[in-house]
Image (cartoon, coloured by chain):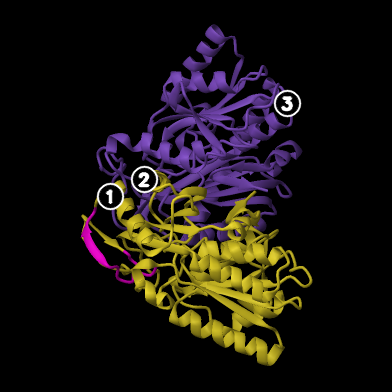
Chain colours: A purple, B yellow
Amino acid sequence: MKKLINDPKNVVEEMVEGYVNAHPDYIRQLPENNRSLVSVRETKKDKVGILIGGGSGHEPAFMGYVGEGMADGVAVGNIFASPSPQPILEVTKAIDKGAGVVYLYGNYAGDVMNFGMAAEMADMEEDIEVGAALASDDVASAPVDEKEKRRGIAGEFFVYKAAGAAADFGYKLEEVVRIAEKANENTRSMGVGLTPCYLPQTNEPSFLIDEDEMEIGLGHHGEPGIEKGKLETADRVADRLVEDILNDMDLEKGDEVAVLVNGLGSTPKMDLYIIYRRVDQILKEQGIKIYRSYVGNYITSLEMGGCSITLMKLDDELTKTVDHAVDCPMFVQK
Amino acid sequence: MKKLINDPKNVVEEMVEGYVNAHPDYIRQLPENNRSLVSVRETKKDKVGILIGGGSGHEPAFMGYVGEGMADGVAVGNIFASPSPQPILEVTKAIDKGAGVVYLYGNYAGDVMNFGMAAEMADMEEDIEVGAALASDDVASAPVDEKEKRRGIAGEFFVYKAAGAAADFGYKLEEVVRIAEKANENTRSMGVGLTPCYLPQTNEPSFLIDEDEMEIGLGHHGEPGIEKGKLETADRVADRLVEDILNDMDLEKGDEVAVLVNGLGSTPKMDLYIIYRRVDQILKEQGIKIYRSYVGNYITSLEMGGCSITLMKLDDELTKTVDHAVDCPMFVQK
């Protein structure tokens, strides 16, 4: 795969440098650690700090979501690898304004370990209260009665949105965690992979797939899905993904949802809106109301081809968080 | 190339349907023509109407830029093909509120013909005053003394931004045209192609290129560039593109520019920010101030791989247009 990079060893450092220099009105690196980025707008006194993070290669996630209405800081990992505890701790110290910090991350072993260690260090060494909420929205990754084993994929976006809004509303740490967990609990995603991405260091494909195949339920790092088959039409793919999602969640006629059709990297917006068209048809047929829609590249896997569909079931509290204005370098909502 | 589509003949209709259904608070189809889309917020009385358009496959351009602060309506063409005069005329009629309508489009033969015919029809049949400003920012497509022959590529974004703002400021039609033309005059772009895109109907590559090659100056529809060579590092690519741009425009130490690093479709944001990093270095070395930066997929070519770099030289008037807030489904600026 052809890439516009320099030395593959430096891609994360150089991306972060470019990012910070492109958006100096939004984001800065902490002098203590170049993998620790925080909003230039200092966290308000007594507002709960929101800290996100994970491996690189998922841009706009995660660093693109630091700004007003979402996260106060981000810890940046290597490609598809969790950030280590130190940069997480540095961000924690920078964004804690007395009300504590909530960590939001996907349910992956490395992230669970490193964010857990950073939380302990923050508590023991710095006396900062830390809460956490994990995204585990990928229906394909474990059965419904083992949701705690599920991976976080694009639905994590809704968890950020919910927690970022709750913190802005002035809610206390336990409340921010509760709302973030509710957002995750109400969110389901299913993806389909068409073409792999290529890690800069090896330039090897993240998974193998034939020229006429798709993989249903593929993970964001090329984790195997639940079914490989011939590539079908957009409508049939959407039918399948939405069916699996609806079978997994409690949605009734009249319920309201937020929808996210997320591109994995190289899939054009044209294809994503054709997928959206069918999602919209299915939900309308079932009497489920789409309150707000997001279509585009929200959490990617480098140049992977394919998409995921995410539904979040709304109630009054979550609707308020979905409506909350956001101003980040890679995502703005008025 | 694997695509998430249904019948290739229907991709534009289905994309538009998905788009309008995803963003009903922003955009609607005119009953007269399903290729005519207008903002749901009616153009203010006496505000000049801004009409954009062109072929499909460049999303977010063009329909993604209809909304507050940018365009009032868009005419949608087939893939990489100009919209015909009729949908342009229908949008013109819908968005004219007495102050006339300005057409903004790229300098391509088909667009020049069809937008020209629509302007004549608007004048003759409807008595609507129409002005026009064309984007011709692609340095690679003709020598500097034949700028009127140059293609419009990603720099068109700045032309939309300038005209959209000028119309919002309440300027009259001639003034809106003057500012749009100044934005184009002050804007230069250079692109590099790494991998082709595939038209849905044929699934044939838009251009041929070897596994280790890049093409400097490649057009948005696969038009040949000025030089094919071995793929180089991101820094060398940025050096080359910026050099060609700077050689073509009048920039001095102390001047201010807006920068756009535009992805052509499948190139990850990681690569785009690594390119931006070098652009930023070069301009700082030369004492040129970057006032504002845009990095991402602004005008694409389906899943084409590569990017373009655009600089717009600013003065007070253009800076005001760059700062103007925008709220469109695919682009929001606070």
State yes or no: residue A132 in magenta.
Answer: no
What chain is tagged by disc 1?
A: B
- On the image, the x and y values in percent for residue B10 come to 49, 72
Mark 2 Cα within 10 Å, few/some/many (few <14, many 20+)? Answer: many
Given residues B290 and B195, the one toward you in this image is B290
Residue A126 picture quarter: top right
Asked if the residue under mark 2 is in contact with the one under mark 1, i.e. CB atoms within 8 Å, the reply is no
State yes or no: residue B224 in magenta.
Answer: yes
Q: Predominant secondary structure in magenta?
A: loop
Q: Which mark is residue A171?
A: 3
Disc 3, SS:
loop
Q: Mark 1 highlights which residue? A: B236
- The stretch in magenta equals B217-231
Q: Mark 2 highlights which residue? A: B278
A153 versus B237 height, above or below: above
- On the image, the x and y values in percent for residue B22 come to 62, 58
- On the image, the x and y values in percent for residue A50 come to 60, 28
Residue in the picture at 72% in, 77% down? B96
**Label 1 is placed on what type of residue?**
Arg
Q: CA distance from mark 2 to mark 3?
A: 42 Å
What chain is tagged by disc 3?
A: A
Asked if the residue under mark 3 is in contact with the one under mark 2, i.e. CB atoms within 8 Å, the reply is no
Residue in the picture at 42% in, 49% down? A265
Mark 3 Cα within 10 Å, few/some/many (few <14, many 20+)? Answer: some
- On the image, the x and y values in percent for residue B40 come to 72, 65
What chain is tagged by disc 2?
A: B
Residue found at the very far right of the displayed protein = B45
Q: Is residue B304 visible?
A: no
Q: Is residue A244 visible?
A: yes
